[in-house]
Image (spheres, rainbow, N blue to C red):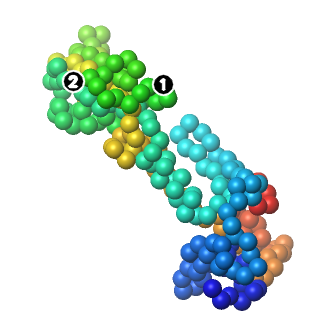
Amino acid sequence: MAAITKNVEEIRNRVILGEFGVKNVHTTDYPGNYPGYDDTWDLEKFQKNFRIDVVNLDESSMEFDMVGIDAAIANAFRRILLAEVPTMAIEKVFIYNNTSIVQDEVLAHRLGLIPIKADPRLFEYRNTEGSEIDTIQLQLKIKCSRNPRASKDSSDPRELYLNHMVYSKDIKWLRPGQELDITMHCVKGIGKDHAKFSPVATASYRLLPEITLLEPVEGEMLPWSRRASYLQTCWSQRPSKSS
């Protein structure tokens, strides 16, 4: 590939968002493409340059920066999270009694999508009828009835009925006289077999932006002087580290 020397680094390492399109979106840093550059993959070099910076972590989400890898590899990690990480999910639903307003098929589908908080590393993939090493058996047996102590003027279902809510978490299914008697089998699986086994609701990635200011942004008075303060609020607060 013929490229002007001063633009080689930009072409190799930057995706440019221009006025009329995006440039340099393809990987070009492979061996022999640029004279004077040794782009042969090296494990020690990769280990030295690659790092993961955790930006945000809580019970339901995680945001992290992957520095030192190609976008295609980042996308591969995203696809692995969606489809290749094993989890436990409800596979078989045995309904012995269901007098609720929810049809058996819909009920079984909803149960299958409930996240099961179990370590899949402790279980094997199920190949037979099921045993304690590959199956978790859960039971749901509940009946809704009227609360004899409820106030006559009350219209709150939480006061009028007993067991009218079936968790998880706030799915309101039952009314007086309705009953559920269900046995469920949880097995180990991966997301590419069925979405219920996917451990993440969604997984996405984006390129870390590098913004170049074409002129100084400074000042102390309105209207132009507060440009620097406004500009600072456009980016999330991340630790500054050299890549």
Residue 202, x across and y down, in percent: 46, 50
In the figure, 220 relative to 77: above or below?
below
- Give the camera-side residue of 32 and 241: 32
Residue 45 seen anywhere in this rendered image of the structure? yes
Outermost residue toward the top? Answer: 148
Q: Which quadrant is home to the C terminus? A: bottom right
Number of marks in picture: 2
N-term mark: 1 or 2: 2
In the picture, the disc for residue 122 is 1
Q: What is the three-letter code of the residue carrying label 1? A: Leu
The quarter of the picture where residue 4 lies is bottom right
Report the side of 66 relative to 161 (left or right): right
Residue 23, x across and y down, in percent: 58, 80
The quarter of the picture where residue 189 lies is top left
Residue 230 seen anywhere in this rendered image of the structure? no
* Secondary structure beneath label 1: helix
In the figure, 114 relative to 220: above or below?
above
Q: What is the three-letter code of the residue carrying label 2? A: Phe
Q: CA distance from mark 1 to mark 2?
A: 24 Å
Residue 54, x across and y down, in percent: 67, 47
- Give the camera-side residue of 128 and 103: 128
Q: Which quadrant is home to the N terminus? A: bottom right
| Residue at screen point 16% across, 34% down | 103
Residue 200, x across and y down, in percent: 47, 44
The quarter of the picture where residue 67 lies is bottom right
Which residue is under mark 2?
94
Report the side of 57 relative to 156 (left or right): right
In the figure, 90 relative to 64: above or below?
above
| Residue at screen point 52% across, 56% down | 76
The nearer-to-camera label among 1 and 2 is 1
